[in-house]
Amino acid sequence: MKKILLALAFIAGTACTTFAQTKSGDSGKFSIGLEGGLPVGDFHNYSNYIIGGSLKYEYPVANNLFITASAGYSSIHIKSFDLSYNDPNFSLQYHSDGGSSGIIPVKVGAKYYFDGHFFGEGQLGAAFATGNGSGTAFVYSPGIGYTFAGGFEAGVRYEAWSNNGTIGQLSLRLAYRF
């Protein structure tokens, strides 16, 4: 996990330096944020909470409309639980001691500012699981938020990861824009 976080920090630093050197006027904004999520649906039976961070870039394409690109890391904290399934032809018993699992969501989308501060946003992309034998899921996340004076931003979104079933979270992102 330390290698993944180091790689994300390196990529973010390189991207910031590159865009800072080519930036002229108000060509776009970066934001770096902390995220916390609560599992929704049946997923709350297996997870307590999700915590992570992300880097986002938004580029203006029209009045109040921005194209966004983001990448981050989310740690899913898993509850201890038992599952059992019994059928005359098949029986299954499973036990989890809990722990955590990592996800790297990479998304693109659009963000629209209604009045300069309130915004609505939608993003689509892929979520890459970090464990052994892990896969990739389709991710989508609609949300709303508010940008404060001084560069701070708060947003709430629903985010779902879909691959042979869907798991979702209600997430809060607190970020600083620069």
Image (tube, helix red, strand yellow):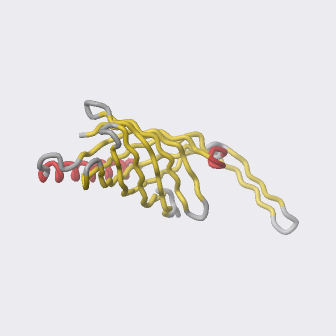
Seen as rendered, the residue at the extreme right is 88
50 shown above or below 129: above
Number of numbered labels in the structure image: 0
Residue 94, given in percent of the width and then of the height, sits at 72, 54
Seen as rendered, the residue at the extreme top is 149
Image quarter where the C terminus lies is top left
Residue 127, given in percent of the width and then of the height, sits at 46, 58
Residue drawn 26% across and 45% down? Answer: 30
Left or right, residue 16 beside residue 84: left
Front position in the image: 125 or 11: 125
Front position in the image: 35 or 11: 35
Residue drawn 46% across and 38% down? Answer: 172
Left or right, residue 138 beside residue 3: right
Residue drawn 73% across and 48% down? Answer: 82
Residue 54, given in percent of the width and then of the height, sits at 37, 46
Residue drawn 33% across and 47% down? Answer: 55
Left or right, residue 91 beside residue 102: right
Residue 117, given in percent of the width and then of the height, sits at 32, 37
